[in-house]
Amino acid sequence: MQTKLAPEFLDTPAGDEAQEIIGKCVHCGFCLATCPTYQLLGDELDSPRGRIYLMKQVLEGAEPTRDTQLHLDRCLTCLNCETTCPSGVQYGRLLDIGRQVVEHKVARPPAQKYERAALRHGLTSPLFGPALRAGQSLRALVPKGLRSKVPERQHGGSWPSRHHARKVLLLEGCVQPAMAPNINAATARVLDAAGIECVRARRQGCCGAIKYHLADAAGGQAEMRANIDAWWPHIVSGEAEAIVINASGCGALVKEYGHILRLEPRYADKARRVSGLTLDLSELLPDLVDALAPRVQAPSTPFAWHAPCTLQHAQKLGPNVQEHLARLGFKLQPAAQEAHLCCGSAGTYSVLQPELATQLRDRKLGHLQGDDRDQRPQAILSANIGCITHLQSGTELPVRHWVEVLDEALG
């Protein structure tokens, strides 16, 4: 598929990259079969192929409309289409470009502007934690529809105090410390048991995904640079051997820092090195299995396993958790059907597109929980705070991070 860029996009980094990506598309339509929104809506403009055509038209000079914006908004950015695509079209990168262009050309209604600004700045603010705790204290008084968005208060438990020769940086995230503090603490305890120390860099913050994927590239990139600055002393000193991330959505973006900041003279090389050092926590599992096997007492009852899109499609690490935890005696069962499809969380998507997100959540839960209540798993495990919170809003079954149950199984 060839495109002739409009003059405003000629010889620009975004235009050149978009043209190269669009040029790989052969209009085969394989992606339609694995696109969640196309499965729900049946509209080709709500499929990767249709959205590529919309972005192609805009880049060729056509004026985008609110309908154009709506079809791009409805995309989950799950990247299932990239896993399916035989031509290697980097749809996610193209969508980020397309959304940025359309955001500058199409004015949003005031309510949408406010909602998106609140998400961009509220979720990444130091005030998010106190605000969430205030909401949790009043949770019983919150209307039922909104209550599911306010998780019950959790306690993180103790953080290990031992020091080890092996050290890794741990990105704690923006919302995870407040919403599910036990995930980071359990990660630190599990790594400590394997002889690896977690270092928490001062002044690190949001990975940048929230702003970047809400068409605020400048804001997202500023957060990326701030993290690189926070991590850099630990990297150049040789103190930390890797940057470990237990939220697969954050990990997927940090592995893209090198690409996103490739044109910035002060940060290009640093960003490339940071991306190269970044590991999803599941990538340490081979080391953990060998070190922890004598101490692990795995439960005999099975768990359901939901591999987030950012783990299985963006990072291509879907089987890691299931395969390696099986070596420790855990029984993880993926969804009986459509294990590859998104649960509907997708960062801020469940807030901005609640109707579609709820349909996808309930569809996913049906496949994970099964019809026979006597055969239901004891819990659903996942690897991303967004998926965990979104799935939990639709079921009484506990939804947890896999590292939490590994932590509890250590004898």
Image (cartoon, rainbow, N blue to C red):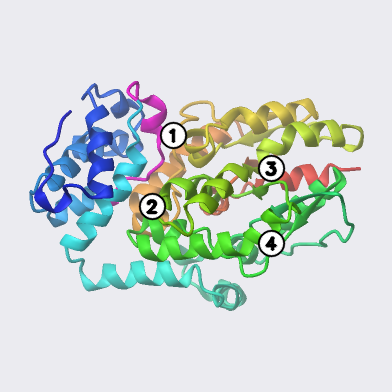
> Against 71, is 230 above or below?
below
In percent of width and height, residue 361 lies at: 45, 44
Residue at x 46% of width, y 29% of height: 338
Cα separation, mark 1 vs mark 2, equals 34 Å
Please tell me whether the stretch drawn in magenta is mainly helix, strand or loop: loop
Q: Are marks 3 and 2 in contact (CB under 8 Å)?
A: no
Query: In the rendered image, which residue does mark 4 sit on?
Result: 181
Q: Helix, strand or loop at disc 2?
A: loop
Query: In the rendered image, which residue does mark 1 sit on?
Result: 341
Q: Helix, strand or loop at disc 3?
A: helix
Say whether disc 1 or disc 4 marks the residue closer to the N-terminus: 4
Q: Helix, strand or loop at disc 4?
A: helix
Say whether disc 2 or disc 4 marks the residue closer to the N-terminus: 4
Which amino acid lies under the numbered mark 3 shown in the image of this protein? Answer: Trp
Q: Which residues fall within the magenta stretch? A: 73-87
Between 61 and 378, the one nearer to me in the picture: 61
Which amino acid lies under the numbered mark 4 shown in the image of this protein? Answer: Pro
| Rendered image: mark on residue 373 | none
Cα separation, mark 4 vs mark 3, equals 14 Å
